[in-house]
Image (cartoon, helix red, strand yellow):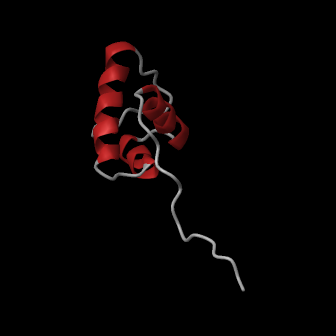
Amino acid sequence: MAELGKGRRVTGTERDKLGADLKKKYAQGASIRELAASTGRSYGFIHRVLSESGVALRGRGGATRTKKA
């Protein structure tokens, strides 16, 4: 994926194309942080674009808490 440049506006068809590409990579298992690093954009930007694309975001994961007896 090409680096987009920090602070550069991404609008219109370019944003739609980016959203579709990010959506595909996210569905294949890439994390938001990995996508942010590969594009040179922030976590928040990637999160927003994925949300705009209609992606159901995954939970944070990690170990689940268990009740101690």
The quadrant of the image that shows the C terminus is: bottom right
Q: Foreground residue, 8 or 63?
A: 63
* Outermost residue toward the bottom in this view: 69
Residue at left offset 51%, top offset 29%: 7
When asked about the image quadrant of residue 2, the answer is top left
Q: Is residue 14 left or right of residue 42?
A: left
Residue at left offset 63%, top offset 72%: 65
Where is residue 33 shown, x and y percent of the image? 46, 50
Q: Is residue 9 above or below residue 42?
A: above
Q: Foreground residue, 56 or 68?
A: 68
Residue at left offset 30%, top offset 44%: 25
Where is residue 43 shown, x and y percent of the image? 51, 43
Where is residue 6 shown, x and y percent of the image? 47, 34
Q: Is residue 12 above or below residue 51?
A: above
The quadrant of the image that shows the N terminus is: top left
Residue at left offset 47%, top offset 43%: 57
* Outermost residue toward the front in this view: 69
Q: Is residue 23 left or right of residue 49?
A: left
Where is residue 49 shown, x and y percent of the image? 45, 30
* Outermost residue toward the right in this view: 69
Q: Is residue 66 left or right of residue 36?
A: right
